[in-house]
Image (cartoon, rainbow, N blue to C red):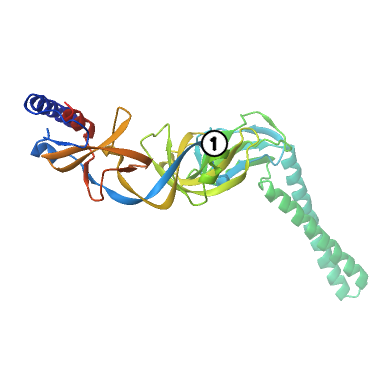
């Protein structure tokens, strides 16, 4: 509504000026302003400043898991799975059950544990009896040593059986319970209820990722390799959230080219509040490289492009506005680096600039 009102006021002013004042002969010439005092108060005015020149490089890439915070769950035993009711995209907590495998191997581990426990108990009784008879000189020292050895062996067998059972979940009811080793989202699920599971399967049953941080991988072509460096600042946008800009830094450069598409990969680690960024999303990555060269810079909203030429509106107040042609050097974020007949601390109009420009040109 504001833009419509301003446009109407500017058009009315422009029509009045067209009949009352001659049109400016060339850009850069000051002319009577179509902007009233009240309208001028609503405009954004930016100041031309000297900034370190930033060159930018636009790359394409995609969002990926943080591989340092991903857990892939493989079956430890063979059997039939049930209660695998979590789905891809579900959030699970550390220790939560993902499914139950009914397994003969677990039955064997439980049986070994029970046998080892019985053997340990029996050898302990034999040792106690041997020690008592040795004190009464009813058996030799060698018999006592044999009883002690048998007890130690029984202890070792029990410890082994106990460890094997605990490594496989500790369940004594022929069941292996798949538990989430970390909290996070189930990003991959490759199992359904009543499927037969093999312990030598090379595919994970579930993949869980903590999406509090994600990795962004960008593709760098050979011609641009010398333009990216560790620590360079980047700005990242996605198709899903085109107006949301994520800021990060290059933290890893893979110094080899991908043999398939002949690009070098660079990585940016991003925090992911609200879990907005999803693995496999396409991303647009703008890499900024600062130099020691100084350049005039203004808000990108101040630039006007018309007939293959950029312009800005230099203003000393509502009654003094002039059109100045400029050359764009580069653009980064909401700042544009320019050259032309401008000076540091000049004031330029940074909102509704195109409407005012058109009104000034009749």
Looking at the picture, does residue 248 appear above or below residue 9?
below
Give coordinates of residue 105: x percent, y percent: 74, 40
Residue at figure coordinates x 53%, y 33% from the top left: 88
Label 1 residue SS: strand
Characterize the local packing of mark 1: few (<14), some (14-19) or many (20 or more) Cα atoms within 10 angstroms. Answer: many
Residue at figure coordinates x 72%, y 38% from the top left: 199
| Numbered-mark total | 1
Give coordinates of residue 321: x percent, y percent: 16, 39
243 or 353: which is nearer to us? 353
13 or 41: which is nearer to us? 13
Looking at the picture, does residue 37 appear above or below residue 161?
above
Position of the C terminus, as image quadrant, is top left
Q: Splitting the image into 4 quarters, where does residue 314 fall?
A: top left
In the displayed structure, does residue 62 sit left or right of residue 16?
Answer: right
Q: Which residue is most to the front? A: 25
284 or 101: which is nearer to us? 284
The residue pinned by badge 1 equals: 187
Give coordinates of residue 344: x percent, y percent: 26, 50
In the displayed structure, does residue 41 sit left or right of residue 265?
Answer: left
Looking at the picture, does residue 44 appear above or below residue 24?
below
Give coordinates of residue 154: x percent, y percent: 81, 58
Q: Which residue is most to the left? A: 20
């Amino acid at each position: 509504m504001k833009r419509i009102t301003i446009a109407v006021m500017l058009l009315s002013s422009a029509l009045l000026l067209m009949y009352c004042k001659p049109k400016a002969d060339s850009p850069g010439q000051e002319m009577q302003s179509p902007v009233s005092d009240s309208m001028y108060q609503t405009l954004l005015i930016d100041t031309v400043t000297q900034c370190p020149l930033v060159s930018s490089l636009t790359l394409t890439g995609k969002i990926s898991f943080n591989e340092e915070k991903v857990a892939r769950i493989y079956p430890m035993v063979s059997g039939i799975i049930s209660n695998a009711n979590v789905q891809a995209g579900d959030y699970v907590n550390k220790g939560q059950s993902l499914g139950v495998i009914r397994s003969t191997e677990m039955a064997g581990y439980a049986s070994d544990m029970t046998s080892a426990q019985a053997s340990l108990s029996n050898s302990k009784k034999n040792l106690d009896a041997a020690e008592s008879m040795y004190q009464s000189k009813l058996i030799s020292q060698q018999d006592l040593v044999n009883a002690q050895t048998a007890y130690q062996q029984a202890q070792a067998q029990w410890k082994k059986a106990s460890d094997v059972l605990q490594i496989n979940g500790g369940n004594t009811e022929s069941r292996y319970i798949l538990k989430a080793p970390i909290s996070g989202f189930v990003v991959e699920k490759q199992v359904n209820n009543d499927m037969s599971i093999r312990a030598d399967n090379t595919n994970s049953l579930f993949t869980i990722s903590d999406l509090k941080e994600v990795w962004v991988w960008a593709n760098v072509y050979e011609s641009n390799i010398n333009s990216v460096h560790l620590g360079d600042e980047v700005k990242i946008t996605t198709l899903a959230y085109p107006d949301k800009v994520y800021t990060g830094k290059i933290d890893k450069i893979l110094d080899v080219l991908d043999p398939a598409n002949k690009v070098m990969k660079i990585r940016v680690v991003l925090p992911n509040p609200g879990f907005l960024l999803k693995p496999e999303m396409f991303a647009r990555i703008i890499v900024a490289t600062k130099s020691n060269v100084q350049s005039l810079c203004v808000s990108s909203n101040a630039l006007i492009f018309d007939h293959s030429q950029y312009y800005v509106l230099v203003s000393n107040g509502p009654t003094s506005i002039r059109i100045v042609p400029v050359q764009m050097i580069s653009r980064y974020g909401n700042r544009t680096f320019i050259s032309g007949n401008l000076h540091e601390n000049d004031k330029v109009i940074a909102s509704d600039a195109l409407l005012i420009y058109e009104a000034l040109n009749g």
